[in-house]
C-alpha cells in the first residue's frame, strides 16, 4: 500500500512538473493565439497521439467492438458511466448545485441497485438525466481561468485548469480507488474503461478524419466550445464576435432602397 501511494504521488509530481515546464516552453514556435500559445508543442503531442491511436488504441478498440455482443458492450459502457456519476455528484456538491446533486445521487443509487451495479441504465428511463461535471468545471465555477490549451499525451485535448482538475477526479472521487482491489487490478479496470470509450468513438474519429482539413484545429476548437457549453449549463452567452458579425454596417439602415429615388428636399 505504501509503495502504491508513493507511485501516485510521483505521478502527480511529474504532472505538475510537466505543466511548469510547459510554462517555460510557450514560445516553441511563437505564440499563435491567446488560447493556444503552445501550438507548436501541442501539435507535436497530437501527432504522437495520432500515431499511438492508429497503431495501438484503434485496432484494439475495433477488435473489442467486433468481439463483444452489442448488449455486453453497452453494459460495460453503462458500468463505467455509473462510476463517473459518483465523480459528477462530488463536483455537484462542491459547486453547491444541490438539486442536481440529488438527481445525480439518485442515478447512482438506482443504477447500482436495480441496474445491477450499473450495467443497466434504469435511471435515465426514470427522468433522471445524466450530467457532466468534473473538477475542472468546479474550478471554473469558482473563478479559476482556463489557462492555455494543452494537448496531453494519450489523454488528448485539455487546458491547464482541466489538467489540474484530473488529479482530484482520479485520485479522490473515482470509486475505482476505493474498490479494495489491488493496484494492478485498478490499472486493468482503467485500461478496459479507456478501450471501451475509444470503441464508442470509432464513428466520431472517422468523421473527424474525413471532414476536417486541419484535424488539430478542429479538435481544439470543438473541445474549447464544449467546455464553454458545459460551464454555462448549455446556455453560453453570445460572443462579442457574434454580435459584431450580425450588426449592420453603420449608416446602412439610412440608405434608400436601390430602386427608390431619394425623397425631394
Image (cartoon, rainbow, N blue to C red):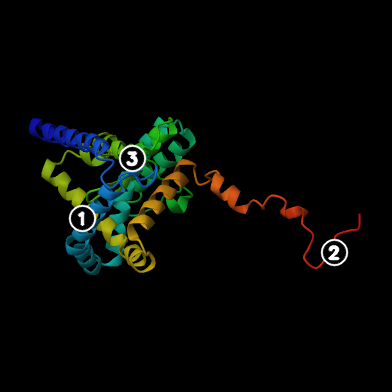
According to the image, label 3 marks what residue?
162
Which disc is residue 261 wearing? 2
Secondary structure of the residue carrying tag 2 is loop
The outermost residue toward the front is 265
Answer with the quarter of the image where residue 13 lies.
top left
- Across and down, in percent, residue 208 comes to 35, 63
Q: Nearer the viewer, residue 238 or 67?
A: 238
Q: Earlier in the sequence, mark 3 or mark 1?
A: 1
Q: Nearer the viewer, mark 1 or mark 2?
A: 2
Q: Nearer the viewer, residue 83 or 8?
A: 8
Q: CA distance from mark 2 to mark 3?
A: 60 Å
Secondary structure of the residue carrying tag 1 is helix
- Across and down, in percent, residue 152 comes to 25, 47
Which disc is residue 148 wearing? none
Q: Nearer the viewer, mark 2 or mark 3?
A: 2
According to the image, label 1 marks what residue?
48
- Across and down, in percent, residue 17 comes to 20, 34
Q: Earlier in the sequence, mark 1 or mark 2?
A: 1
Q: Residue at x 37, y 53 (%)?
A: 121
Q: Residues within 10 Å of mark 2 (few under 14, many from 20)?
A: few
Above or below, 215 against 115 in this view is: below
Amino acid at each position: 500500500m505504501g509503495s502504491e501511494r508513493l507511485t501516485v504521488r510521483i505521478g502527480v509530481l511529474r504532472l505538475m512538473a510537466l505543466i511548469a515546464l510547459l510554462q517555460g516552453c510557450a514560445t516553441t514556435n511563437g505564440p499563435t493565439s491567446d488560447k493556444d500559445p503552445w501550438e507548436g508543442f501541442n501539435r507535436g503531442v497530437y501527432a504522437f497521439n495520432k500515431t499511438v491511436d492508429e497503431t495501438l488504441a484503434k485496432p484494439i478498440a475495433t477488435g473489442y467492438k467486433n468481439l463483444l455482443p452489442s448488449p455486453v458492450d453497452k453494459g460495460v459502457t453503462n458500468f463505467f458511466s455509473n462510476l463517473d456519476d459518483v465523480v459528477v455528484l462530488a463536483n455537484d456538491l462542491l459547486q453547491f448545485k444541490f438539486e442536481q446533486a440529488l438527481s445525480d445521487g439518485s442515478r447512482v443509487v438506482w443504477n447500482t441497485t436495480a441496474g445491477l451495479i450499473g450495467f443497466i441504465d434504469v435511471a435515465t428511463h426514470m427522468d433522471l438525466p445524466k450530467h457532466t461535471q468534473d473538477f475542472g468545471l468546479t474550478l471554473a465555477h469558482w473563478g479559476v481561468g482556463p489557462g492555455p490549451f494543452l494537448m496531453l499525451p494519450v489523454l488528448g485535448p485539455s487546458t491547464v485548469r482541466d489538467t489540474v482538475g484530473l488529479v482530484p477526479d482520479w485520485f479522490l472521487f473515482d470509486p475505482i480507488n476505493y474498490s479494495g482491489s489491488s493496484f494492478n487490478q485498478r490499472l486493468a479496470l482503467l485500461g478496459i474503461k479507456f478501450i471501451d470509450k475509444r470503441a464508442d468513438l470509432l464513428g466520431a474519429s472517422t468523421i473527424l478524419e474525413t471532414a476536417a482539413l486541419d484535424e488539430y484545429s478542429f479538435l481544439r476548437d470543438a473541445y474549447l466550445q464544449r467546455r464553454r457549453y458545459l460551464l454555462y449549463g448549455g446556455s453560453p452567452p453570445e460572443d462579442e464576435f457574434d454580435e459584431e458579425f450580425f450588426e449592420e454596417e453603420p449608416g446602412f439602415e439610412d440608405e434608400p432602397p436601390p430602386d427608390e429615388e431619394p425623397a425631394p428636399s
